[in-house]
Amino acid sequence: MSGPLKSFLQYTVIFLITGLLIWFSLRGLTGDNKAQFLLETWQSADKGWLIIMAVLAMISHVLRAQRWRMLLEPSGDKSTLKYTFLSLMVGYLVNLVIPRGGEVSRCYNLYKLDKTPVEISFGTVVVERMVDLVCLLILIAIAFVVESTRLFAFIDTLPIGSGSSSSKFTTLAIIVGGLLLIGFLLYLFIRKNKKIRGFLVKTWKGFRDGLLSIFRLKNKSLFIFYSVSIWLLYFLMSYAVILAFPETDHLGARAVLSLFAIGSIAMAAPLPGGTGSYHVLVPQGLVFLYNVPQADAVAFTFIFHGWQTAIMIVGGAISLIITSVILKKNR
């Protein structure tokens, strides 16, 4: 199967799954006119809190761009905050179409702006993701400590972990065996091809420099401060949206923690921007944990995710236009 055809089929399946999950979630809305119900929920929202959420989102993006800039400095690539911010926002835009594609696209965007080697910048992006994963796990752990009874009860309702131990072991063995076989075949192919081997060695050296940048930071305390601040802003963004709707404004900080944990798990699915998985899991969490009516929970989730997506689309599109203008001036 050719590369383009394989990619086409892969993304077709992804978007079909996304559409199916959205359709399944929309079934929770009451009445025949579901669009009207969503519109009424939007109209009932306090737009002031939604604007505050958008401002907090942009501040978090600026801090993330500055943190990325810090990781690039030890390798000798002193990019500007302007360029890292524009590249970051373009990456967010691409992520909405191609799952996990934003990580690579922002590196290429930065290369076009200031010639930062892609392999080095991608290494720093991997470091960023590792740090973010630690922060996310800490936040989820706090959520489970604060709301352990409710969250564990919610997990028990999900269709995961079913099946016998022997079937799980067989599946795991097949996956591991397949990966080992693919790895061995790739090793033989690379060993025989000097051109590809040279390219991979060069790429690995740059990637390694990016990975090791965290150990060469001049101000590690400031890096930790940025990381904590970014995730604190994410929490406050969720809180602001919770307060914006009369159906959820009474839930409080504990509920925000729980929904943050559920939403983070949903966003980890390999779907564009978590679309679909987010729309299924979060409403179920609101209904099961906090007795929010099903229709209100679904409408809230659609508007919450839609508002976040709109911010990324607008910010990403503007950043893409500015990048194009800068590149034309440079030429």
Image (tube, rainbow, N blue to C red):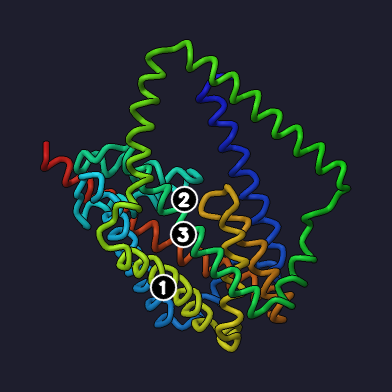
Q: Is residue 116 above or below residue 21?
A: above
Quarter of the image where one finds residue 75: top left
Which residue is pictured at 30% across the width and 58% down the height? 65
Horizontal relation, residue 216 to residue 26: left or right: left
Depth check, mark 1 against mark 3: the one in front is: 3
Residue 85 visible in this rendered orientation of the protein: no
**Three-letter amino acid code at disc 3?**
Asp
Q: Which residue lies under the disc numbered 3?
A: 132
Task: Name which residue lies at 60% across and 42% down.
Answer: 14
- Camera-side mark, 1 or 2: 1
Residue identified by numbered label 1: 233
| Coordinates of residue 148 in the picture (x, y in percent) | 70, 76
The reply, left or right, for residue 229 in relation to residue 35 is left
**Is 204 rendered above or below residue 328?**
above
Say above or below: 48 vs 195.
below
- Does label 1 or label 2 sit earlier along the sequence? 2
Residue 127 rendering spot, x and y as whole percentages: 41, 50
Residue type of the residue flagged with mark 1: Leu
Q: CA distance from mark 1 to mark 3?
A: 13 Å
Residue tagged by mark 2?
Answer: 96
Is residue 45 shown above or below 131? below
